[in-house]
Image (cartoon, grey):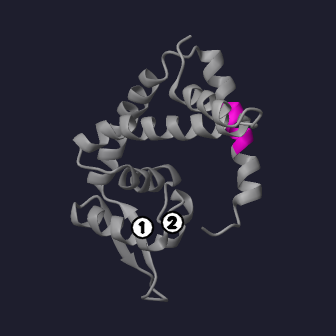
Amino acid sequence: MTEDIVARVLRQWQQVHPGLDTAPMAVIGRLNRCAALLQQATDAPLVREGLTRAEFDILGTLRRTGRELTPGQIARETFASGAAVTKRLRVLEARGLVARRADERDRRVAHLSLTEEGRELIDRLIPHQLGYESVLLEGLGEGRRTELAETLAELLVLLEGRLGGLQP
């Protein structure tokens, strides 16, 4: 197996500080590097459609929940700030992909849903996007992918429990 960039960094730290426990860096450094590479790669098909990952996530959230959502609910579902969601919704509305409906009792509250065009776009994109992401993971066998997904799920639950309430 060839050496990855993180292994080189770990080796360099061991030369500078022999005995330094770099085990956390081995995990977190690789997770960060994988995340950065995957973000670049997985956004490519979306860019061709004129979407950002965040806009795609909003369309996907509205499609998978199958109901109208408020901007606050979308923010919670997509792990984004309210301001970021508002900005993205403006773009999606301008493109005719999302429709806004004012609440009958409280006009300050908006309910958002996919337009027919938005639903058609996400329904066309999601299989293509998942196929593309599957190709990116082809080097790992199905068993290894399952094991990795389970390990990452365990780490995510652990981190959400420890860090979920912390503010940046």
Where 119 sits versus 148, above or below? Answer: below
159 left or right, relative to 6: right
Q: Find disc 2 in the rendering and name its residue.
A: 75
**126 vs 157, nearest the viewer:** 157
* Position in image of residue 39 (x %, y %): 42, 41
**Quadrant showing the C terminus:** bottom right
Identify which amino acid the numbered label 1 is placed on.
Val
Q: Residue at x 36, y 41 (%)?
A: 123
* Position in image of residue 14 (x %, y %): 67, 31
Say which element carries label 1.
Answer: helix
Q: Residues within 10 Å of mark 2 (few under 14, many from 20)?
A: some
In which quarter of the view is residue 93 placed? Answer: bottom left
Q: Which residues are magenta?
A: 149-155
63 left or right, relative to 11: left
Q: Is residue 85 magenta?
A: no
**125 vs 139, nearest the viewer:** 139
Q: Residue at x 34, y 70 (%)?
A: 87
Q: Residue at x 74, y 39 (%)?
A: 154
User: Quick check: marks 2 and 1 in contact, CB under 8 Å?
Assistant: yes
Spatial CA span between label 2 and label 1: 6 Å
**51 vs 27, nearest the viewer:** 27
Q: Residue at x 52, y 72 (%)?
A: 72
* Position in image of residue 7 (x %, y %): 59, 26
Question: Which one is earlier in the sequence, the residue at label 2 or at label 1?
Answer: 2
Identify which amino acid the numbered label 2 is placed on.
Ala
In which quarter of the view is residue 88 placed? Answer: bottom left
**103 vs 53, nearest the viewer:** 53
Q: Find disc 1 in the rendering and name its residue.
A: 85
101 left or right, relative to 18: left
